[in-house]
Image: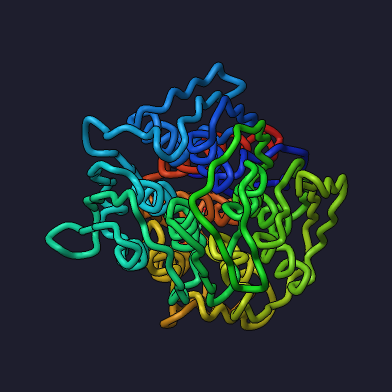
Amino acid sequence: MKLLTNAAGLVGEIEVPADKSISHRSIMFGALAKGKTTIKNFLRGEDCLTTLKAFQDLGVTIEDDGETITVEGVGFAGLKKPADILEMGNSGTTTRLIMGILAGTDFTSVLSGDASLNKRPMARVMDPLNQMGADLTGAAGGELPPITIVGQKKLQPIDYLMPVASAQVKSAIIFAALQAQGTSTIVEKVASRNHTEEMIRQFGGTIEVTGREIKITGPQTFSAQSVIVPGDISSAAFFLAAGLIVPNSEVTLTNVGINPTRTGILEVIQAMGGSLTESAIDEKNQSATLTVKTSSLKATEIGGAIIPRLIDELPIIALLATQATGKTVIKDAEELKVKETNRIDAVATELKKMGADITATADGLIINGPTPLHGAAVTSYGDHRIGMMLQIAALLVKNGTVELEQAEAVAVSYPQFFEDVTSLNGGR
Ligand code: S3P
């Protein structure tokens, strides 16, 4: 696909799509609750539709009237053995979280995804679930999908010190712990997004969180809720960046989720000297309107505990750094290597093709800026966030064209992405 280049300035207001993490979990909790859960502003991107379909395949009635999704909850015990392999597509969140749910069933299920998903590490989830008494095995006895899950109705609680900072792993263990007999303790290495913990409370369950320690006593039951999903800060990130680096821009993004476990990018923008204002802050729904303006940016260092709070934003932050004065260092981000693609290598390789001064390191990136970007033939590697980052990069290209391979990947989290770029660029 030929990308939009040489933008005159992005000006206007958009509502970014619904939060991917919360949309997945709203289907899951709706299915596990007793009663009818309604979900408004559900993200109809490919990953969340994978979750919706997987729960239908597990015997849950889920309907979409175009506005509201209705889930007829069946409880943990009401899930039915699927007739076939459960298709996970490109979705790591569906795969890892559902493993924790299926670990406590009385049937066997198999999960398989696309070429990218079937290369992603699953031992991080299989190990703790196997310690709890379930029986999970990967392809050829290893840790990669297809994963076979032999459920165990009588899961044991677990005391688990997490070796990786991952909300997906944490959530899978939490889902298993909710079905176990007794109290489980999970200690996170570094705090990660807490949507699962928040939704347990929203659906009437209990969870105790003290710093990085989480205690869950099972078994628990949930009651149906009405969920309204806020906009995804990880999708907003692309337009926050575009508004800061495309000349003559002023972009306003409404209803953006600002759960503090997700807002690392806002702190980075402030540290880089970007013009960012928050308004219409809604404490209850954890959302706000964010406005950015073209700014001269300075380099920064990003590492340590902030990393899980902006893990999905690092590709677009790397692009920001190519336009900032000085040397930006991103470290402690080795998890980027096991996302939809190896995002450290993908970001460095593709931005280098466009003229950036960027070097991949073992756990991050080093970027010297500012550098002008030029036309090139680039690829998303089938990774939605790499594809969107490259379109924002292309907006800065004055001469030449940018041809993006596998542009369709953006539909995983942001089906309207290219339309929103065009509309903010005045329809040009
Ligand atoms: C997610 C957690 C993160 C993130 C992913 C969504 C979630 O993955 O990258 O896009 O919804 O729990 P990890 O937990 O593996 O870091």
One can see residue 243 in this view: yes
Q: Give the image location of residue 90, x and y in percent.
A: 36, 47
Q: Is residue 371 visible?
A: no
Where is residue 203 shown, x and y percent of the image? 62, 41
Q: Residue at x 46, y 72 (%)?
A: 159
| Coordinates of residue 125 in the picture (x, y in percent) | 36, 62
Which image quadrant: the N terminus?
A: top left
Q: Nearer the viewer, residue 257 or 328?
A: 257
Q: How many numbered discs? A: 0
Query: Is 323 placed left or right of 94 in the picture?
Result: right
Please indicate whether residue 61 sits to the left or right of residue 106 in the image: right
The residue under the point 23% across, 45% down is 110
- Quarter of the image for the C terminus: give it: top right
* As drawn, 298 above or below 14: below
x then y, percent, for residue 67: 61, 21
On screen, 357 above or below 404? below
Q: Quadrant of residue 399?
A: bottom right
State the residue in front, 403 or 79: 79
Residue at 52% across, 27% down: 71
Q: Identify the image quadrant of residue 169.
A: bottom left
Colour mapping: rainbow
Of 112 and 109, which appears nearest the observer? 109
Q: Is residue 398 left or right of residue 156?
A: right
Residue 241 lies in what quarter of the image?
bottom right
Q: Looking at this rendering, what residue extends furthest in the top direction?
A: 65
- Residue 232, above or below 389: above
Instruction: Please name the residue shown 41% across and 46% down the image.
Output: 94
